[in-house]
Amino acid sequence: MKAHLTRRYMFSASHRLHSDAMSKAENAATYGKCNNQYGHGHNYALEVTVSGPVDESTGMVCNLLDLDRFVQREILQRFDLENLNNRAEFIETIPTTENLCTAIYDILQRGFTHAHLDKVRIEETMMNSFEYAGE
Amino acid sequence: MVYLTRKAEFAASHYYHNPDLTPEENQRIFGKCNNPNGHGHNYTLEVTVKGEVDPRSGFVVDLKQLKEVLHREVLDAMDHRFLNKEVPEFSVQIPTTENLAIAIWQRLVSKLNKAQLHRVRVYETPDLFVDFYGEA
Ligand SMILES: [Zn+2]
């Protein structure tokens, strides 16, 4: 029987939303306070949802220890307490939470093989959240 | 179609162990959860049903009936219980969050009239939950 398992993680990071393709005025108009040249930070909540048949011998979709280890190594170590603008993932793209969602989805999709990846959901603040399911 | 979700909480203890595996394998796979003395969680259960809104009552489901079924079939059986020892499903299956969601689905699905069961979500902790939609 197929079940969907969601695990929630926290990390903190800073970013600045700024596009070199836009003028100063356009950047200010598009990103508002988030364009502040010194950046600002968030406590992000990341939810990773995986799915698959429940293994009869373990009762699990995938071993939580494997998922935690992967996320710790490949995602939290990469982004927690970092400036997202300095990360390789955001050389070409702007570290909006939309782009953070797709970047994290890609890392999981490429490297986590123990279960099917359903979606990635990120809460940037308590007031906004973003989801990406590879569509 | 309208979806309605009812929330409930229960506290229960469990441990993870597969008698077909060696003690070393059990330890490797289940880690701390393999301790036979068990440990406990405050589970949060969300049951989502769906249906068309009844034009006379304005309801998708009689919430009173849903609450009754939820109490009788799930909470009375699982709240303040040792799942491995006191809930029949888990004398054979391992009481993981996955199997708990499936067992709760199976306890509810035939007991609801009118509304159709859509999803059972079980939070083991605020950081971990499982959704079951009755998928084979
Ligand atoms: Zn546990």
Image (cartoon, coloured by chain):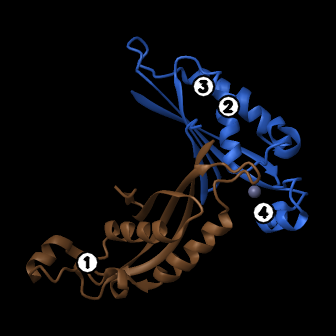
Chain colours: A brown, B blue
Which of the two marks, 1 or 4, is nearer to us in this view? 4
Residue type for callout 3: Leu
> Does residue B39 appear anywhere in the picture?
yes
| Tag of residue B32 | none
Question: Is label 1 in a helix, a strand or a loop?
Answer: loop
> Does residue B9 appear anywhere in the picture?
no
Residue type for callout 2: Gln
Point out residue A127 in the picture as x, y percentages from the top left corner.
37, 59
Both labels 4 and 3 in a single chain:
yes
Quadrant housing the N terminus of chain B: top left
- Quote the CA–CA distance across marks 4 and 2: 25 Å
Q: Mark 4 touching mark 2, by CB under 8 A?
A: no
The quadrant where residue B47 appears: top right
- Quote the CA–CA distance across marks 4 and 3: 35 Å
Crowd rating for badge 4 (residues with CA inside 10 Å; few <14, some 14–19, many 20+): some
Q: Mark 2 touching mark 3, by CB under 8 A?
A: no
- Quote the CA–CA distance across marks 2 and 3: 15 Å
Location of ligand 1 given as a quarter of the image: bottom right
State the residue position of label 2: B106
Q: Which badge, 2 or 3, comes first in the chain's sequence?
A: 3
Chain bearing mark 2: B
> B12 above or below B106?
below
For the point 85% across and 45% down, the residue is B84
Point out residue A44 in the picture as x, y percentages from the top left corner.
45, 70
Point out residue B7 in the picture as x, y percentages from the top left corner.
58, 39
Residue type for callout 1: Leu
Question: Is label 4 in a helix, a strand or a loop?
Answer: helix
- Left or right relative to A88: residue B123: right
State the residue position of label 1: A17
